[in-house]
């Protein structure tokens, strides 16, 4: 869990304006240096801010790539599931009197849309279907070795793409953690800096506004999930059971 992207963008805007504005006023820098914020220390604060900005923008870019890859992944899954189910529906009928071949192909029982189970079922199906002794019994139904090989390759392509997506998802998580740590360091530095500025200008706080320094209190933001949407099988709707209220009938 972490702060929203909007929250971080607001901080980037506010803090960036402060660093940009304060550097334009030598008189201000001379005053604040008396409170321990000489040029080198301000430069360090700028470096902390830049590091946070780097991780934030890197995360946004990586997250967008991951979301795009996720959409492709869902399309691939939809296609291989339909392709596999078309085979199953046809062969269940064609092999209704051949229990042995049906069992070898795993045609009996329900099909599970959970990805792990489906991948096991479909992989087993294509592996068994291309065995000579099984293929000889099903090739008369319009199935060819080329079709089965292509369908099996589609499943492997999906698996490769899924691995690439999960790797990118992990990189997003890593960037989220780095961004969070960089933000904390930058925020702590800037909070101390602004506090010193308010002390230095205690008699004229409005003068700080031209430096981009306002009351820098942390906005109240609800925490939201920062990771890219992850893939999950659709949940089945839960039907609520309404209890009938029994009324007593007097005779």
Image (tube, rainbow, N blue to C red):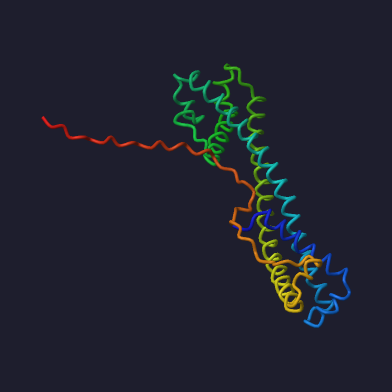
Can you give x and y, in whole percent of width and height, for residue 37 in the image? 80, 78
Can you give x and y, in whole percent of width and height, for residue 178 in the image? 69, 62
Can you give x and y, in whole percent of width and height, for residue 87 in the image? 56, 24
Which quadrant: the C terminus?
top left
**x 51%, y 29%: residue:** 105
Number of numbered labels in the structure image: 0
**x 76%, y 69%: residue:** 206
- Is residue 147 placed above or below 153 in the rendered structure? above
Q: Looking at this view, is 152 or 66 the one in front?
A: 66
- Is residue 42 placed above or below 228 in the rendered structure? below
* Left or right for 104, reference 54: left
Q: Looking at this view, is 122 or 71 the one in front?
A: 71
Q: Looking at this view, is 120 or 35 the one in front?
A: 35
Q: Residue furthest left?
A: 251
- Is residue 247 placed above or below 141 in the rendered structure? below
Can you give x and y, in whole percent of width and height, for residue 77 in the image? 61, 35
């Amino acid at each position: 869990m972490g702060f929203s992207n909007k929250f971080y963008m607001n901080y980037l805007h506010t803090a960036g304006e402060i660093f940009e504005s304060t550097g334009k006023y030598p008189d201000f820098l001379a005053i604040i240096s008396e409170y321990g914020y000489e040029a080198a220390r301000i430069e360090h604060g700028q470096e902390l801010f830049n590091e946070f900005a780097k991780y934030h923008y890197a995360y946004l870019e990586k997250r967008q790539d991951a979301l795009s890859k996720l959409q492709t992944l869902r399309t691939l899954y939809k296609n291989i599931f339909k392709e596999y189910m078309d085979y199953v529906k046809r062969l269940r009928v064609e092999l209704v009197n051949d229990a042995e071949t049906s069992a070898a192909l795993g045609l009996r029982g329900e099909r599970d849309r959970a990805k792990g189970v489906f991948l096991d079922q479909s992989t087993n199906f294509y592996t068994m279907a291309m065995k000579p002794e099984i293929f000889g019994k099903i090739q008369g139904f319009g199935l060819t070795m080329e079709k089965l090989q292509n369908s099996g390759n589609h499943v492997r392509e999906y698996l490769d793409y899924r691995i690439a997506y999960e790797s990118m998802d992990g990189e997003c998580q890593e960037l989220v953690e780095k961004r969070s740590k960089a933000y904390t360091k930058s925020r702590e530095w800037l909070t101390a800096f602004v506090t010193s500025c308010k002390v230095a200008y205690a008699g004229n706080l409005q003068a700080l506004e031209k430096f981009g320094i306002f009351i820098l209190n942390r906005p109240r933001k609800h925490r939201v999930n920062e990771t890219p949407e992850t893939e999950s099988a659709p949940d089945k709707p839960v039907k609520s059971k309404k209890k009938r209220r029994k009324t007593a009938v007097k005779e």
